[in-house]
Each structure stands twice: as structure tokens, then as C-alpha cells.
Image (spheres, rainbow, N blue to C red):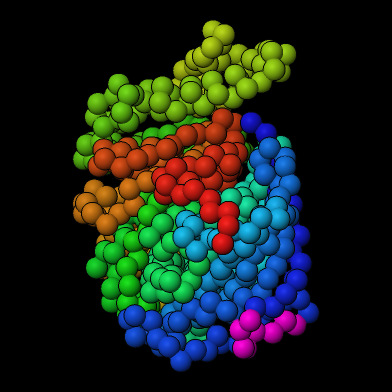
Amino acid sequence: MKHRAIKRRNVVIGIGAAAGAAAVGGIALNAGAATASTTANGDSDLVFDPDAYTKLTTTVTDTEGTEHAVTYHFWKAITYVSKPVDATYQSLIVSAPVEIDGTAVDASNAPILLANSIGGYMPSSVADATGVGGGAMGGGGAPGGAPTGSAAPSASTSATSTSNANQNTNATGGATSSNQLLALAAGYVVIEPGARGRTLKNSAGEYYGTAPAAIVDLKAAVRYIKANKGRIPGNVERIVSAGTSAGGALSSLLGASGDSPLYDKLLEEIGAADASDAVFAVGAWCPITDLEHADGAYEWNWGTNALSTGKQVDQTVSKDLQSQFAEYQAKLRLRGLKGSGFGTLTARNYDEYLLKQYMEPSATTYLAALSDSDRETYLAKNTFITWDGEKAGFTWDGFLTHVGARKKTVPAFDAFDLSAGENNLFGAGTTQNRHFTAYGAKNDTTGIGSRRVASDIPEKLNLMNPMYHLVEKVNGKRSKHWWIRLGTNDTDTSHVISANLAARAENLGDEVNHLYYWDQGHGANTDPGDFITWIAKVTGYKKARTK
Ligand code: DHB
């Protein structure tokens, strides 16, 4: 595996033919992209103007270290709903390659990478983006703006997401790569949507970006794209959603909940285009999802790992939550992935399942790629691993000790003192933070509220949880292709969360590609080139090199 930096250099070299497009200081201004036509659905103000682009160039260094010159058409922020609550967030940008390494490219039927840059369930904006990868421009680097649960409550009220999302940090090489740039260099169309997030508050003190605003916005973005079939570049039937962490959760949810009528009213309220919101495939890195079960799953996984202070969390609370997880897991009736040899996954066999299906193969891949001397050094430092010349072996306890400190206190997501980012995610009206689990509400230490979850919470949980759409409902319009990735050292949530999502999708007959990156932490994406290749495979796309 090679980890190389993706360099980006945007140069404005031309202006699109559109009346109303102008360049100011290198930034293209799309003055409304007004046209007289309407979409097939009659949304006169949701018409994509194919001519309102700026022509840009960028240099993309691929995962082999080879540089590619890419010329692409760039459409600056377009509001994707007709009744925006806040257009700063409810807008998207479009990038379509026209020339790669001097050869003309026709991307009109190419897959569309729908890359969100949402982190921490915070607001995410592309309003000021001046080129591809614009969704991550405000932040860059690791997802520092993300909440870290009750261990580090996020009190931020105005910041835009600074998560890396699709702008992935490669901890091993210290390099940064981006799904967006690699996709563009592969000839795909890249669309980057912004979305409202949990901290947004209006002048009346009302939170307008809490659950389920972000998923409603992403769906509206998909509807905008599909309503503009034939006008917007790319094959709108081959949208591949991608995101990391909260963005990965929302990407999975977008895939799981495609065309669910449960969102119709909310979509209507913001003036979403009247079109399908189903996406073809999902890429999800370290998805922070299944939030109402995440506290139990977290304790099952990391319950005995101490915090970075060296302190253990309250073991009584941890045990309570673990038994809730056991009950939940039993109810799911999931089977291990094909070929795993595991039948029903339970709280009793899940450690062995994770070990055999994911952790040992992950360590094996890592060790096999090292030189003999590097491998020897690594094994001498990590004596919990046995290496038989071909395969790594270790115990679950050995693995837990190797990972070390847990990132979050207990409960990790529905904090008793309402200090977790997720408490804010489930805020509503003028209430910033609320409980969303019965256990959290019952053990509340803030003295506010009724010790029960509010009556609107159960429905909001469903609207936010891909598992709801895959288990309680089996949504036939879901994505049938799933790329799921997670670092083995990531303690932002339980390893079970991704593994359950993967197991459920595969149990339903979907194609699932799920791996854990050895020794990688939160937000890692160490095989972006493989993701790009996977997109070509699942969509059946062969790059069209000539117009
Ligand atoms: C993210 C990280 C978290 O630990 C969390 O609880 C929610 C979101 C993130 O990085 O997006």
C-alpha cells in the first residue's frame, strides 16, 4: 500500500458560456443560473444550468504517486431546494472532468460521487467553494470539529463542520488524499452537498439543524440531481454517496432510506424537487450511527478499557448498558458474513466474530505488506500477536489492550449531563440538548426534563437510523452496494456498529465490501484508490475517453 499526498492546484482558465456567469478574483459567480425552462416536475427554480460553469484545472496525484492533469467544469454553489431554510448549507457544487492528461473525457454518463463533508453532525457548507473538494475547505486535517461525546462536549454554536470527511487523513503516511480528486481523475462527476447541522440557531433561539435536518437536506440534494437528469453531468442512476463519521452515518442512512415516504412531508416543506432520492451505492467510513443502541454497543466493546486519564468508567453503568446491547443484538437476528462460519451474532460470540472476520485479517494484511525487518520490529513491539509466516493471531483481550484508552466516557452518546454532541443532535425548538434513550433520560443529572424521552424522539430516531430502514422496514429502494471502512483503533463508536450494518445489508442479499484498517484511528481512509475502482466495478462504468 502506498500513501501519497494528493496535491491540488486550482487555476481558473476559462469561464462557462452561461449568461450570468462571471469571474471575480478567480471565483466564478453563478448569478442565479436563470433559465426559462422547468424540470420535468415543474420546479421552475430548481433547474440546473449546464452552461453556468467555470473551467478549472487541477493536478491529482494518484495512489501510485503518478500525477494527472485534470481539466474540469465547476458549478459553484447552487441551492438545491426552492424554499431554503438556510441556503448557506442547502447548496451543492458540481465538478465534471472534461480532459484528463490531455485526452478529452465525456463524463455525461459517468458515475456521480456524492461526497458530503459532514463531521460531528455539524453544519456543512459549500457556499464559498471555488473548486472540487470545496466541502472540506473550511477545515482540512483530522475531524477536530467533531464531538467526542461526553468526554469533550462540543459547545460550539456557529462553526461549520471541520471534519475531514472525504478529505481523508492517512495516519500512516501523514499524507492527505481525497475521494473527490481521485474520482475526478478517474473520469467521474463529483457533487458535493452542504447540509444543515445541529448547532444552527435562528434569531428566535430555535435550533433548525438538529435531527433529521441533515438527512432531509441530503435527500433534497439527490432529488435535485435526479430532477435534472440530462441537464446535470453524470448518470443520475449511478449516484455513489460517500462520507466519514457523522457523514458516513448520513451516507449509510441515505443509502438505506432511499425513497422512504417517511421524509416526504419534510422534503415538501423545504421545496425539494419532486424526484427519487434513492442512491445506487454507499461509501461509509467509520459511520457513527445506530445512535440509540450505540451506548450499549460501546460498553460491550470498550467497557473495560480505561479512559486516557487511566480511570475506568463507572462499571455499574457500563454493565447496565452492556446488557441492553445483548438484548438488542439478540433481537436483530443477524448472521455473520458469508464464509465467516458464524451463524447468529450475539453479545457472546461477537468478540470472536470481529476477531476472525475483521481484526486478524486486518493485521495480517498489514503485516504481510511490511518488509521482513519492519515486520520483525513490529512483532517485537506487539508481542500479543503471533505470526506464523502467513497469518496474524491474537486474542480479543490482547486486541483491546493494544487499542488502549477509550475515547468516550459512559454513556458515550446519550450523556447523563446532556453534554454529548448527540444530545444536541436531538435538540428541538429552543432546547439545545435532549436525551434520546430511556436509560439516559432516567439517569439524567441536569434536572431538566421529565426523565422520559420526549414524544417526538422515537420517530426522529427512526429517521436518523439506517438500521431502521434495513431491519424494521426492509426498504426495497435501498442501495444494494456498500463500501464500509473503519480503523481498528477507532473508539469513537463500537466496532459492532459497522459490522452490524454490513451483516444486515449482506443478509438482505446486498453486495458488501467491509474492511477494518489495522492500527488506524478515527477518519482513516487508507485505500481510496480501491474505492474508486470499486465504483467502476459496481456501476459497470468504463471511462469514455472521447467526446
Ligand atoms: C463524529 C465523531 C463522534 O465521536 C461522534 O460522536 C459523532 C460524529 C464525527 O467525527 O463526525
Q: In which quarter of the image is the C terminus?
A: bottom right
From this view, report whether residue 510 is shown above or below residue 281.
Answer: above
- Locate residue 544, reporting x and y percent: 53, 54
Magenta segment? 17-24
314 over 112 or under it: above or below: above
Q: Percent from the top left, x then y, of residue 319?
A: 36, 36
Q: In which quarter of the image is residue 451?
A: bottom left
Examine the rendering and report whether any part of residue 291 can be seen.
Answer: no
Q: Answer left or right for 330 relative to 55.
A: left
Residue 42: quarter of image: bottom left
Residue 21 part of the magenta-drawn span: yes
**What residue appears at the point 60 percent right and 20 percent down from the top-left corner?**
367
59 part of magenta stretch? no
Q: Quadrant location of residue 71?
A: bottom right
In this view, the residue in front, 299 or 26, is: 26
In the image, residue 107 above or below residue 14: above
Q: Say which residue appears at 47% left-offset and 34% top-offset.
A: 515
> Which residue, as the protein is rendered here, is positioned at the far bottom?
36
Q: In this view, does 260 lie to the left or right of 45?
A: left
